[in-house]
Image: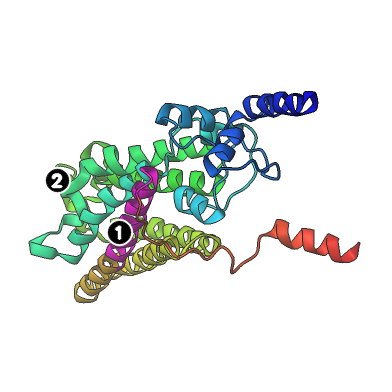
Amino acid sequence: MERVQQEKRLTDIDDTFNPVFSSLQSSSEDSGHRNYMDPPSPYRLKADASSDEALKHIRTANTISISPELFEKLYLSPQTPVKGNLRNTFGNPTPVALLGFVLACSPLACELMGWRGAGGNGSATLGSYYFVGGMLMTLGGILEFFLGNTFAFVVFCSFGGFWFTLGSTLTPFYNAYGAYAPDPTKPYEGLTSEGFHASFAFFLLFMGFMSLMYLICALRTNIVFVTIFFGLFMCFVLLTGSYWQIAMGQFAVAAKLQIASGAFAFLACLAGWWIFFAQMLASVDFPYQIPVGDISHLIRSGTARAQDKERFSA
């Protein structure tokens, strides 16, 4: 009789005391039996746990792991180890930089194609080059720098600089085209001069060269990002040809090249809107996600190749 009472006391203590993971005990009680083989986890919650309690469990966890595919969708660059915990502290700046790109480039693409009588080399949307494309992309690029995302930092800042350059070129205050005008009192005539088009085309040419390098690097990210840089590369190359044709007086050929460049720019914008929408859905943890075509697994990283080499040589 005494032995039975002692076993009962031990059972009562065991049922009421779990000093490490009390939620493990609750889970076992709900299932009707105790399971000592369950690995302890700080994420284990009671069935009736409140949202505040769940958030507390997540915040007290030191790290939050996300898949490489999700990381590339959110930051547009392969996941690389960085010091600190800024990615879990601050918001993701990538969408705001993408928004600056698509809001500045989409109207310009339509103007280059001459839709509904649009034209003027994008002068009508001059303000968006400064305050949307230039400002938002540069801001997003700087914030990507602090998060340790080198590729996104360089891409966004370089294109932010492009929008500032395009805006200042079309602004009369900077006299970029006025310097080529035959009559100083009519600076707008410089926009039709041979020298201005022949000179500005070189800037567009090297923007295309830069986009080609980004296109190659984007092969480690996703299909949507590759599409953006392919469209931009073709846009800059064709627009360069259009400006040189204008300089040589071949206006018919130049007009066709300009329309084609606008079409490729519009393709890049469509891809930009797609990945922007994908990132916004991911930012609110929407139950349905749209794919971006992850292709990072097709080209293995240099780090992985070096590790394999060390493993085989050992």
Please give the name of the residue rendered at 42% of the width and 44% of the height, measured from the top-left corner. 94
- Which residue is nearer to you in this view: 158 or 282? 282
Residue occupying the far front of the picture:
1
In the picture of the structure, the residue carrying the numbered disc 1 is 269
In this rendering, position of residue 304 left or right of residue 159: right
Magenta part of the chain: 264-286
**Camera sees residue 171:** no
Instruction: Estimate the spatial distance between the alpha carbons at disc 2 and disc 1, rounded to whole Å.
Output: 35 Å
Against 307, is 249 above or below? below
Please give the name of the residue rendered at 38% of the width and 67% of the height, measured from the top-left corner. 237
In this rendering, position of residue 253 left or right of residue 312: left
Q: Give the residue type at disc 2.
A: Lys
Kind of element beneath mark 2: loop
In the picture of the structure, the residue carrying the numbered disc 2 is 186
- Which residue is nearer to you in this view: 152 or 208? 152
Q: Is residue 274 magenta?
A: yes
